[in-house]
Image (tube, grey):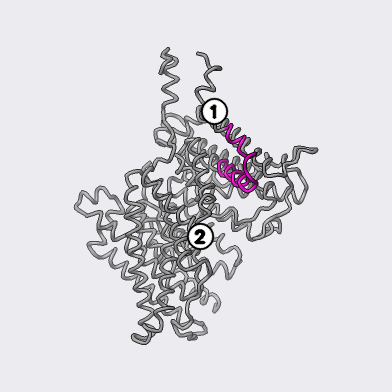
Amino acid sequence: MRIFLEQMLNGLTIGSFYALIALGYSMVYGVMKLINFAHGDLFTLGSYLGFTLLVWGNAYVTSHVGLAGGMIAAMLIAAIGIGTAGIIVERIAYRPIYPAGRLPAVVSALGVSIFLENIIMVLWGPRYQAYPVNVVPTLRFEIGGIHITLLQIVILIFSFILLAILYYIVQKTTFGAAIRASALDRDTAALMGININTIIFFVFALGPALGGTAGVMVGMYYRQISFTMGWNYGLKAFTATILGGIGNIPGAMVGGLLLGIFEMLGSAYISTAYKDVFVFLILILVLIFRPRGLLGEKVAEKV
Amino acid sequence: MKPNKNIILKNWPIFIVIIILSVSPFRMNNYWIDVFFFFGIYALLGLSLNIVLGEVGLFDLGHMGFMAIGAYTTAILNTHFGIPIIFLMPVSALAAAGFAWLVCSPIIHLRGDYLCIVTIGMGEIVRLTLINNPFGITGGPNGVFGIDFLSFGGPLVIDSSIESYFVIWIVVGLTILALINLQRSRIGRAWNCIREDEIAAESTGIDVRYYKLLAFVLGAGLAGIAGNIYASKLMIVSPESFSFIESCMLFCIVLIGGMGSIPGIIIGSAAVSLFPEIFRAFARYRMLIFGAAMVIMMVFRPGGIWPRKRGSVEFKSLLTKAGEDNV
């Protein structure tokens, strides 16, 4: 039982990363019907940006605002930076291609992905980079026999705050209703007076911003980052999107958390080597038996 | 009608390409011959993906999985049982095609992006399973090595760069001939009809499910043959050769070249395989340039370099039958 709860906790931590990244895929897919393959690499870029801020800016920032302030600053700057990068990518690589249909946009997205991956390699070098140790003090607590580190608590709190804010924006505000309406039917939403360009701008800024924040958290949690890690996280987060129902924002959150828990329980009880195989098997089974995802509405795709 | 005299004149660019391709290896060093060998492998894979993606419009981002099945079938049967590579070519094709039939049957009803995602998952499952070394036959991350050269019996062993160059390009040539016939056949028309409008295709009596599966099975079979040639040339197969990024590259070959266009696929595979070699002088910037080139390419020519001219063949033949020879 103790192992089960600890694995649940680890799964929840990883799942919160997947959920944050998955939101970017889901929002963009909802509005644009485009799988943004560059999203995984924007996430990596966020991780590297946070790394630079924490390593180079560490001494300066921590002496002025303390450790916690330095960490929040790193996440914030990474979020702003990656949000801007997301908008630039949309302007340069996606916007001119929309009229040509969806397939050229996929190739363009793959091109951006290769470009970003290599620009990270050129700027930071091909080696693994290690996050500093002392970002969050290495403290361990024991609650009812379950070990939990301070780092995990911090990550869980931060990601749940972010998820809650996004949930509030999307589900409770007028602007959120506009996003959901555009995801449902873009043309009709435009006829109803919704400014689609604002929505696209927002979606391409906020999705990558959340991904960039997740990048900093992944760096702090695993302490090791590489320029190729975007593919792996991107693919997993994308699986999470499908699991929850593509284009459905609460679905992406739930899907991400569930995927993290599946992965951890699978590696604890069945086989570590095959944990990724289980992830993809779940994906395929979900698509065969419930293609709209766990929380998705029934949609008839146009041919 | 004087077809025999005109066939060379009409198709002169094709004959020039054939002549250049058959003479050029004698003027190149071994390095470039090998680069052109991989160009051929990419061309074969591009043509095989083109059946699925270009002709029928099914998104397949796990195509390397089929090639992996073919390559590993060849590698395992050759190293464990010593079966000659030449006999394993049809076996690999059948293994890959059978695998495609098995995994695609339950998912063939999925559309668009959903199919795309399932094929990504399938390709990744194949790669991860190979890494995990099931029953100790795939050699884990190291792969299988010590595969024989392709041999036609006796002294005819394909063991030099130039020989394998000719093997791959002859296979590509035969494949192109087969595919041109396929494009003009009832099957090809049914495929294109499904791509343009699936509901209309179904309502005119086309068995959509059957033709979609057929495309996957044929595409996978061709990829299996590519896997066989690849394994015997490199003498080693390892899971990392069949990663998701390679499947993405194949996807790009078809779209950069032009969907459903055979000359387009050849140009697309040239772009993907030769571009990084030509820009080798830029060292670490070359893939950066490559990514940027893909974006620019799609911005300015979203239909691909050589889009397929649609309908012209059919109209021409109709008009010819009507007696208007000079169209």
Can you identify the residue that label 2 sits on?
B284
Marked residue chain, label 1: B
* Mark 2 surroundings within 10 Å by alpha-carbon count, few (fewer than 14), some (14 through 19), many (20 or more): some
**Residue drawn 34% across and 85% down?**
A65
Tell me which secondary structure the magenta stretch mostly adopts: helix
- Relative horizontal placement of residue B84, taking residue A68 as reference (left or right): right
State the quadrant of the C terminus of chain B: top left
Q: Give the range drawn in magenta.
A: B18-44
Which chain is mark 2 on? B
In front: A64, or B90?
A64
Question: Image point 44% across, 52% down: which residue?
Answer: A291
Is disc 2 on the same chain as disc 1?
A: yes
- Extreme residue toward the front, this view: B27
B273 or B132, nearer to the observer: B273
- Identity of the amino acid at label 2? Arg
Of helix, strand and loop, which one carries label 2? Answer: helix
Residue beneath the point at 42% across and 72% down: A216
Amino acid at the residue labelled 1: Asn
